[in-house]
Amino acid sequence: MPIEPIAPAGKNTAARRRTRFSVPRGLIAGTLAAAALVWVPYAFIPGASLLSALVQSGIYLGLLVLTICSRRAKVLLVRTLQRYIMNPLFRLMVTVGINPFGLAILETRGHASGKIRRVPVGNGRKGDSFWIIAEHGTRAGYVHNIQHDPHVRVRLRIGLRYRWVPGIATVCPDDDPLARQRQIIAWHPLRALNAVNVRVLGADLLTVHVQLNTAPAGQRSGPPPRSGAEARSARPAVSADSPGIRA
């Protein structure tokens, strides 16, 4: 399925000057959306816990303040939680076929160790394209792996079964991650929920594109995979002003 080209973002958007205390684009909107998901059930569901709503709101506010003060500290905190608590749990759930959050598994090869690395990501599939919004930008381990080896696999639900689909991944620094995120949500509630989590937990969003090879193993043919630079030059960019469905 061909990707419709969208006008590239302006230079002032891609190279916006940062100050010591800055708020990443989309963070405030994501925090407000997350708070709404906490307080709306409390307002309309009898017996909802006020303490739980206050605690969750405090966590979101703390993450917001931490991001403004030190993005590096936030990335360290969130990556630690994801590595030892969240990612193992989500990987196990997807492996056994329990996937209430609509996630996929991205498989890369460690650039230093050479070992297989698997990380849960939001399901941003659009035909033969798979889009990922890396919440930690170039600090994400799988982004480092992709920059050294673009050959990846994605575990997706194809029909009634989950299977591994090979692909070529490309980091897209000139792509607008918020505009791309709005585009791939497409009124899908689980993707919208994942988008909120990415904005709340993220510090420097970055777009990653995976060109999937969905043909059966015996029918895969075509030219050899392009290098990262060639694939990157062929990928269309998304502008911050492009129309899309807002999360």
Image: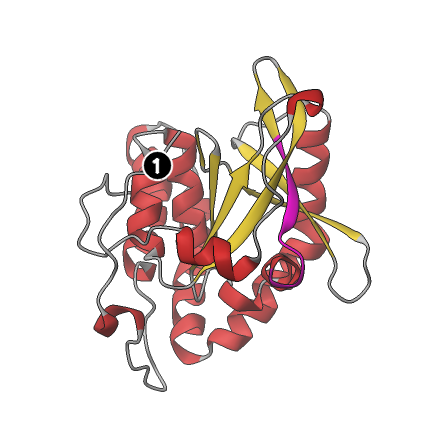
What residue is at 39 percent from the left and 66 percent from the top? 64
* Residue 120 placement, left or right of 114: left
Which residue occupies the foreground of this view, 62 or 153?
Answer: 153
Q: How is the image coloured?
A: secondary structure
How far across and how far down the image is residue 164, in percent?
68, 30
* Residue 219 placement, left or right of 3: right
Q: Residue furthest front?
A: 223
The magenta stretch spans residue 150: yes
Which residue occupies the foreground of this view, 200 or 175?
Answer: 175
How far across and how far down the image is residue 32, in percent?
29, 52
The answer to whether any part of residue 97 appears in the image is no
Disc 1, SS: helix
How far across and how far down the image is residue 73, in percent?
54, 75
Q: Residue furthest top?
A: 160
Indicate the quadrant where residue 160 lies.
Answer: top right
Tell me: residue 193, above or below residue 35.
Answer: above
Amino acid type at mark 1:
Ile
What residue is at 25 percent from the left and 69 percent from the top? 13
The answer to whether any part of residue 140 appears in the image is yes
Which residue occupies the foreground of this view, 36 or 26?
Answer: 26
What residue is at 28 percent from the left and 39 percent from the top? 4
Residue that numbered label 1 is attached to:
185
Q: Which residues are magenta?
A: 147-155
What is the crowding at mark 1: few (fewer than 14 residues within 10 Å), some, or many (at least 20)? many
Tell me: residue 240, above or below residue 180.
Answer: below
- Quadrant into which the N terminus falls: top left
Indicate the quadrant where residue 65 lies.
Answer: bottom left
Which residue occupies the foreground of this view, 24 or 40?
Answer: 24
The magenta stretch spans residue 236: no
- Quadrant into which the C terminus falls: top left
Tell me: residue 21, above or below residue 232.
Answer: below
* Residue 69 placement, left or right of 214: left
